[in-house]
Image (cartoon, grey):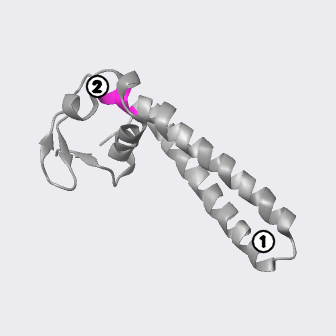
Amino acid sequence: MLFNSQIRQYHKELHRMYDQKRKLSQRYGYAIEMDDNPIEATNVSKELEKLSSNISSLIENEYAQAVFEEYKAKKPVLIEVNTGEEISWDHAFGNDFSKISKSIRYSLVGLVEEPGRYIFKK
């Protein structure tokens, strides 16, 4: 499925952030192993917390809204991954982004990032 440039931009940004988080996690592990540098471990831990918060914010807000805006008028039929059941767009997400819970916003992003709770029906 082709995505608009805004969705591609958020996709790249999210993956850049995940890569940064992976590197910070490794740095944190090394700092903990060294045990003689608790300040480094504390500093890296704070960086990880901030980055994790930024990742959540990107997914829950900008990225989820970009996916919602791209597909709300098209209302594609979705398949719930766990059950194989067909679900309407309105049943899954409705038509007002502000009323979508944070957990369901992750499902919006999961449509383009996969795997997610739903996939597009082919």
What residue is disc 2 on?
Answer: 72
x and y, in percent, of residue 118 in the image: 26, 46
Q: Nearer the viewer, mark 2 or mark 1?
A: 1
Q: Residues within 10 Å of mark 1 (few under 14, many from 20)?
A: many
x and y, in percent, of residue 117 in the image: 29, 49
Q: Nearer the viewer, residue 122 or 108?
A: 108
The type of residue carrying mark 1 is Ala
Q: Nearer the viewer, residue 77 or 25?
A: 25
- Residue at image position (17%, 37%) is 77
Q: Which residues are magenta?
A: 67-71
Q: Which mark is residue 31?
A: 1
Label 2 and label 1: CA atoms lie apart by 46 Å
- Residue at image position (55%, 38%) is 57
Image height of 53 relative to 45, above or below: above
The kind of secondary structure element at disc 2 is: loop
Does 27 appear in magenta? no
Locate the N terminus and report the quarter of the image it occupies: top left
- Residue at image position (73%, 67%) is 27
Specify the quadrant of the image occupied by residue 44. bottom right
Q: Residues within 10 Å of mark 2 (few under 14, many from 20)?
A: some
Image height of 25 relative to 94, above or below: below
x and y, in percent, of residue 47 in the image: 73, 52
- Residue at image position (75%, 78%) is 33
Image height of 11 relative to 31, above or below: above
Image height of 76 relative to 120, above or below: above
Q: Earlier in the sequence, mark 2 or mark 1?
A: 1
The type of residue carrying mark 2 is Lys
Residue 118 seen anywhere in this rendered image of the structure: yes
Q: Which mark is residue 86?
A: none
Identify the residue at the far left of this view.
Answer: 85
Residue 4 seen anywhere in this rendered image of the structure: no
The kind of secondary structure element at disc 1 is: helix
